Image: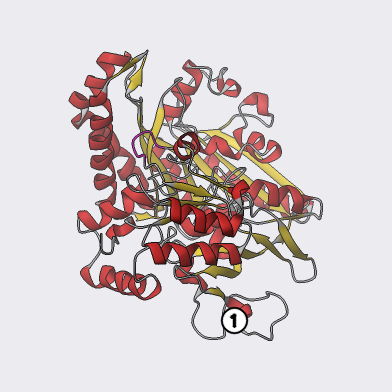
Amino acid sequence: MSDLYNKLEKIVTDKYISNDIYVRHAYSRNVDLVLQGVPDIVIRPKDAEEISEILKVANEENIAVIPRGAGICEFGGSKPIGDNGIVLYLKRMNNILNLDEENLIVTVEAGISWGKLNEYLCHYGLYTGCMGPGSGMSASIGGGISHHSVGGGGCAKYGVCTNQLVSLEVVLPTGEIIETGSQANVYSKFPFNRFGNGPDLAGLFCGDNGIFGVKTKVSLQVFPKPEFAEYKTFQLPRKEREISAKIMTEIRQKGIDVYDTMYIMDLIVRYGIEENFMPLWQHLKKKRGVIFYTIEANTEAELDEKVKQLDEIMLNNKAEFLGPEISDGNLGKWQYTEGNYQFYHNLWGIFPSMQPLTAECFAPINQYPAILNDIDQWDMEHNEDIRKIFEITKIRSIAGSGPVLLIDGNNVEITCGFTSFWSYYNGEVHKFIDDINQKLWESLLKRVTEAGVQWYMMGDFMSRLMVDIGAYSEEYYNLMKSIKKILDPKMILSRGKFNFWGEK
């Protein structure tokens, strides 16, 4: 390992590489409390050229390389599978390279966060449309592209963040550097269009979860932020899941260009009030779910007409308006005007020390009530295992879903799952908790997969589970594997995801 370390140190200098045990453990986890893989080395390159050299060395030594942005993904996406490999930490590459105000395209390094980019753009009256993942204030641009991320705001209007992609600079697993989109033409002086010059090779790296290449430079469309906006929050009547789905369907059928629509189930409202998790709802007498919309417009007249149409849909479905101010419980205003997009993960952290074992997926609007109902059924079926953890912690794990978010088309994003505890609790280690957590998580993911959803954040756990349970058709999986072999013959990059291991 010392010979490998010396080769890598020459590429980045000793300031940007470490094999210290504390550093390696710091980069061994993501959001979940189950998966851990400790790398041999953590390295922080400054550009595509350094990454290219690192990957060439990794191929020579046949050692895995794991790209890592902000590291706030689920399913073990940005840490090794097992204890080995090189974590390629990309947050040093966080610069804005160019803003083309005439063509409304920004070019950035892939390690920059969605929050930093949008803070920069706001000074020009612009934003990225989809604001990235629900953790977008800190999530990296490269990670969002790797996952088809949503959740940071604007997803009903703009869809997933890869919709606004124009071009990519990518380092392939064997070290070659390519550009996609308009930049595939060597005579093109600046990015302006994703499609053309042959097949859409950028699409190969969108949603690849880091297996086909390392994103180093990203060009995105940006959009003028409309001057006018309105945001209203409503409490839903009984049968709230079905009613919320009906409301979202009607919004789409009427063609209303809504910026965001989000349903928050009664479980979140109830626990949020009981635990003082959401102070703006403390006055609510009914512990039922809520739904809010955010709408933007370029004129007051346009805004008024859109609000009129949306209010009619809400009121016809017997939803009750909570009031215009944040103090009235207007979650839509709180989120949009104060930028509280990370509320999106409100199932997490309701109780201190509880952690998420979640599942982020897309589904048609008309399917999500049945999926949420089935999660309730799953919870009852697995009560015996859940009780084993309760006997230690005296707090029961919570199964359900965070917000259901309208995205492009007649689709929603569902962040479902359950909360649980670490094996270390109250000064003692209870190893069986890890085993139960992993068993329950796998069971829930399998259950939701069998509902026919589309996963976008897959990482270590979900990508391999899809293969293990036969969720991919043989033809589809073999095509993925063939592409992987061509691009990465030694399976160096993100080794093990989708069970692409190569020769051990």
- In the image, the segment drawn in magenta is 32-36
Q: Is residue 475 left or right of residue 223?
A: left
* Image quarter of the C terminus: bottom left
List the residue tagged with mark 1.
184
- Which element carries disc 1, helix, strand or loop? helix
Q: Is residue 46 left or right of residue 174?
A: right
Q: Position of residue 392 (x, y in %)?
A: 28, 14
490 w.r.t. 129: above or below: below
Q: Position of residue 406 (x, y in %)?
A: 50, 50
Identify the residue shown where x is 53% and y is 22%: 277
Q: Position of residue 227 (x, y in %)?
A: 78, 51
Q: Position of residue 107 (x, y in %)?
A: 69, 64
**Between 130 and 263, the one nearer to me in the picture:** 130
The chief SS type of the magenta part is: loop
Q: Is any atom of residue 252 visible in this view?
A: no
Q: Is any atom of residue 500 visible in this view?
A: yes
Colour mapping: secondary structure
Identify the residue shown where x is 67% and y is 28%: 326
**Between 78 and 230, the one nearer to me in the picture:** 78
Identify the residue shown where x is 34% and y is 56%: 497
22 w.r.t. 148: above or below: above
Count of numbered labels shown in the rendering:
1
- Magenta segment: does it hold 472? no
Q: Is residue 28 left or right of residue 82?
A: right
**Neighbourhood count class around disc 1 (C-alpha, 10 Å): few under 14, some 14–19, many 20 upward:** some
**Between 390 and 29, the one nearer to me in the picture:** 29
Q: Amino acid at mark 1?
A: Ala
**Between 64 and 428, the one nearer to me in the picture:** 64
